[in-house]
Image (cartoon, helix red, strand yellow):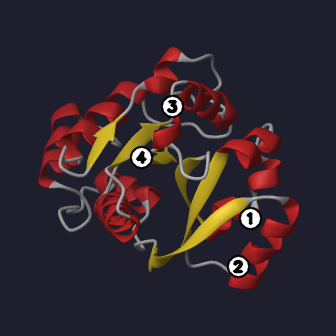
Amino acid sequence: MNCYFFGTFNPPHLGHILLAQSVKQEFCFEKIVFVPAFSPPHKETLDFFHRYNMLKLAVDPSFGEVSDIESKLPVPSFSFRTINKIYENSKPKELWDGKIPFITGYDAIMGIENWKNPGILKEKLKFIVLKRHSGTTEADIFALSDKGYDFVLSKNKYFDIESAKIRKMVSRGEDIKNFVDKNIEGYINEHRLYR
């Protein structure tokens, strides 16, 4: 069974990779499928194909794969559309309790009802929820189960690395080797991204 990890990945960093590896190990998933947003409705971001290419460089096939599914769907890239398509193409054995395993953080799941068509997400996703540095508590998360959301709490935590910080560092000419894979660093420099 695979687990899905959505995001802008702008750029993908070591936090994303370590998180995926740890979730895969904790829940014994076959692979983590990274799904970069093609055209997110509320964010301006780097061209999809640069982000997709960087993920392909960063994600080792032994633990994950990168999907371009959102580049083939209508824009803007609402998660419910992507989830519907993944669900439609999934066999029962690829689901967990009939749902798609989906990585998210405390802060994101607390805002889930503000997403487009949250009922579809409630119906088709089993959330793997990771702690993130925010004011949200486990009690806040468990309150969502009363609303019908299906989730498990991971013992892992989000790694405290932010893509926005990396973009600023690149724009200032600072060294980012401690935050991204060396192949990503090379790609950013070769294509003069974030400058």
Distance (Cα) linking label 1 and label 2:
8 Å
Q: Does residue 96 sit above or below 54 in this rendering? A: below
Residue 120's x, y, as percent? 76, 39
Indicate which disc, 4 or 2, sits on the residue closer to the N terminus.
4
Look at the image and tell me in which quarter the C terminus lies.
Answer: top left
Residue 15's x, y, as percent? 35, 64
> Which disc, if any, is residue 90?
3
> Which disc, if any, is residue 110?
1
- Numbered disc total: 4
> Label 1 amino acid?
Met
Residues tagged 1 and 2 counted as in contact (Cβ below 8 A)? yes
The crowd level at tag 1 (other Cα within 10 Å; few <14, some 14-19, many 20+) is some
Q: Does residue 104 sit above or below 119 in this rendering? A: below
Residue beneath disc 4: 9
Between circles 3 and 1, the one closer to the viewer is 3
Residue beneath disc 2: 136
Distance (Cα) linking label 2 and label 3:
32 Å
In the depicted view, which residue is nearer to us: 92 or 148? 92
> Callout 4: helix, strand or loop?
loop
Indicate which disc, 3 or 4, sits on the residue closer to the N terminus.
4
Between circles 2 and 3, the one closer to the viewer is 3
Residue at point 57%, 37% (across, down): 44
In the depicted view, which residue is nearer to us: 169 or 187? 187
| Quadrant hosting residue 80 | top right
Name the residue at the front extreme. Answer: 93
> Label 3 amino acid?
Ser
Residue 34's x, y, as percent? 39, 43
Distance (Cα) linking label 3 and label 4:
24 Å
Residue at point 41%, 66% (across, down): 27
Residues tagged 4 and 2 counted as in contact (Cβ below 8 A)? no
